[in-house]
Amino acid sequence: MSNLKSRLLLIGAMVLASVWALFPRTVIERVKRDGVFVQDTVRRIPLKRGLDLQGGMHLMLEVDQSKQAVADVSDAIDRALKVVRVRIDEFGVAEPVVQKVGTDRIIVELPGIDDPDRATAMVQRAAFLRFQITDETQALERVIPRLDGIIKEQSLAIGAETPLAGADTAPANALGALLQEADSTTGGDTAGTAIDGPFRRSVSPGQMPGQYLVASADYGAIDTYLRMDALRGALPPGKDVRWGTDSIVLGSITYRTLYVLDSRAIIDGTYLKDAIPNQDPLEGAKVDFVFSTEGGSRFRKETARHIGDNMAIVLDDRVMSAPVIQSAIGARGQITMGGRDLQAAQDLALVLRAGALPVPLKVAETRTISASLGADAISQGLFSGALGIGLVIVIMVGYYRFSGFIAVCGLLFYVLVTLAILATFDATLTLPGLAGFVLSIGMAVDANFLIFERIREELDAGRTIRLAIDEGFDHAWSAIIDTHVTTALTAAILYQFGTGPVRGFAVALLAGIFASLISAIFVVRTLFLLWQSRNTTAQTLSI
């Protein structure tokens, strides 16, 4: 009886723990408030649902050949797939699907996503990081007369309905409109001196070497000029011209920053080992980064040569900041976010850790999956599960009588524990997961079939009820273990090499296998022991 009491107490504890795991409750978690993650009390809902059950977001990605010509698209998609998968995994979406379709596309499915714009930006962002020294030779000032002269020449060409050489139609039309506006400010004198051109009027030196200021009102015009092939060829050789992410307010006018940088990068993001978002009370959000040993050595050597110079931190061809190098910098550094919130720093750290995309991607298709489809799938899945359990109950009780009733009690325990295991490990319930759960119901009663048939054989051989039950459980043990272990190995392989719904099926199956073993070997045997303790003089067993 002492052993029986211990068994019953353990079963009671497992039931209470399972109910607690499945019960929604309020817990303390980190949540985002006003762009900053803080601790807050939130309601925890167990058994999150997957894309097929609760809806979500479907993205189709392909290589953006307008930004970069790619010869081997299939190979580029394979390399981009790894980066996108790492980014989505770190993004924290439960049970995402990231897979290659055909030879030129990637499918991304995000269940329950509540910020589709952020997710889209996450998978498309190039995240190419470079550190470049700002120009100190005033190279842009020397070519501004030539740039304005080219613009005047192009103005005459457009006036004569001559197409811009090497320019796309849309930028050419935009440039024509801008030149007409520029000409109107000088009385239409397209043959005037280059001194009165748009670069001379709009671009002025900034607050540090290599920095220039452009009024926000003129940003669109100057950006259009800089993208024209005719002007790019006239820019200073060995220099990159990049827009900054920051702005400066002087008087009542807001200026955008423009930087001229040495084309040679002192180091780039290929040496990056880790990136960690942080919040500083004075500087605001920032990202602390760590280079590898080789990268740290190179960074220290290069920054030692440029003490006193401004070093631009360039991400995706945009200058994040350009601090002065005070001393040699080793393997660690930081990127300030220029007033942006902590979420922006977290997103930047995420894409930096995942690495830069090998090719630019664009969204070929976006589709939102309705939650109403999920409701239908849930009702059908629950109906199939209830039908399966109902048929199993009818068969077990009708065939094994009282022993079948004991097996049904063990089956109810199995259902409760399986769902609790899924909830404890924050598993996401998908339609394939429901299929795995229903399949494991059959495995749960299969162990009881083996045990009961062995007990019958022992009773037919003249054993007592107590001895027959003991022998039935002991001799069926090896067969039960064999079937459960082989199925568990299959489920483990599916989980390791599968993605999305396949993993959901494997997780539900593994949880069911574990609960099935406890139910058949421990719970059902304990119920038999309880019956024996109450019926010590029984001569027959309803089986």
Image (cartoon, grey):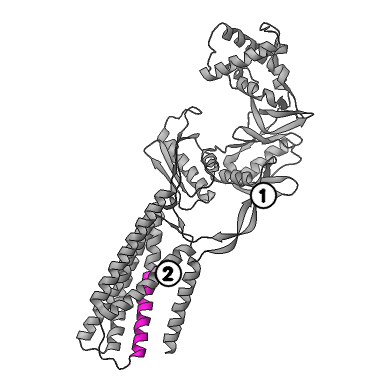
**Image check: 356 left or right of 451?**
right
Give coordinates of residue 236: x percent, y percent.
65, 21
Identify residue type, mark 2: Val
The reply to whether residue 331 is visible in this rendering is: no
Residue drawn 68% across and 6% down? 189
Region in magenta: 514-543
Quadrant of the snapshot with the N terminus: bottom left
Which residue matches tag 2?
A: 417
Residue drawn 47% across and 40% down? 80
- Residue farthest right in this picture: 251
Whether residue 539 is in magenta: the answer is yes
Give coordinates of residue 57: x percent, y percent.
46, 44
**Image check: 336 left or right of 524?**
right
Task: Choose between 450 and 297: the one closer to the eye.
Answer: 450
In this rendering, the count of numbered labels is 2
Whether residue 538 is in magenta: the answer is yes
The label on residue 278 is 1
Whether residue 30 is situated above or below residue 310 in the rendered picture: below
